[in-house]
Image (spheres, rainbow, N blue to C red):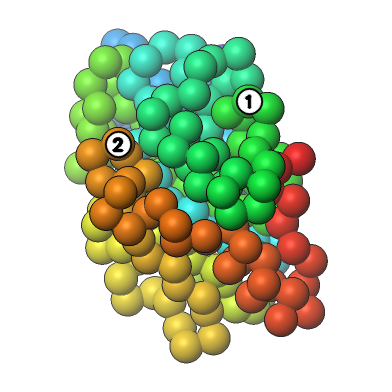
Amino acid sequence: MSADQISVPAEWAHLPFFRTDWPDINRRLRNQGGWLPGPGSLFAAYDGLGPQDTRVVILGQDPYPTPGHANGLAFSVAPEIALPRSLKNIFRELQDDLGAAPENGDLSHWAAQGVLLANTALSVPVGDAGGHSRWGWDGLVRQAIAEAQKHGPLAFVLWGKHAQKAVADLPRPQDLVIATAHPSPLSARRGFFGSRPFSRVNRWLQENGRAAIAWAS
């Protein structure tokens, strides 16, 4: 699949982003030499997860810039890839919080349960972290969250200042907001470890009459 064959996720295609920003981004991707996660995974966070099914939002910054690692979901990697350091810390906190963690770094089972694993930029040049961060991608995640909010309260899990700033004005009183340090080794000990986001989200979901997320399965 080439960049000019990318399919817009059907349940989000009505968002203004796809009329106003996507044509230019798509043109730039077609002219970009090598970029990740590649055309088939570009909209993975939104494929198969509609606004009405979104229950939890976890924000990342941009895909992993190493070929073969990113699969289009924030913090997630292909099953055979060794855990990146931030994801290793996420799983450590999950183990401490709920007593179990997934067997590999593919988080698609979270997405299947209504967790929007959205990067604020959906593409990255090979080997150049943040290289597409100013392309206008951030409008998509903000519009997607606002659309999902029409269907009920959301749980926001905001790790680090970038995620917190990206959606600073979007959470409402009825939403849950868990904002801590980033799980990066540089900051995880400044408030990420011990924050127990997974049990807190599940408790909040159940208090609102919704099913808990099976984080470890």
Quarter of the rendering containing residue 35: top left
Q: Is residue 3 among the parts visible in the rendering?
A: no
Residue 33 appears left or right of 208: left
The image quadrant where one finds the N terminus is top right
At which x and y percent is residue 60?
Answer: 39, 45
Neighbour class for label 1 at 10 Å: few (<14), some, many (≥20)? Answer: some
Camera-side residue of 86 and 143 = 86
- Residue 104, numbered circle: 1
Camera-side residue of 213 and 188 = 188
The image quadrant where one finds the C terminus is top right
Element class at badge 2:
loop
Residue lying at 44% horizontally and 68% vertically, measured from the top left: 178
Neighbour class for label 2 at 10 Å: few (<14), some, many (≥20)? Answer: few
Distance CA(mark 2)–CA(mark 1): 19 Å
Q: Can you say whether 52 is above or below 187 in the image?
A: below
Q: What residue is shown with label 2?
A: 185
At which x and y percent is residue 52?
Answer: 69, 66
Q: Is residue 98 among the parts visible in the rendering?
A: yes
At label 2, which amino acid type do we have?
Pro
Q: Earlier in the sequence, mark 2 or mark 1?
A: 1
Residue lying at 52% horizontally and 60% vertically, measured from the top left: 197
At which x and y percent is residue 32?
Answer: 29, 18
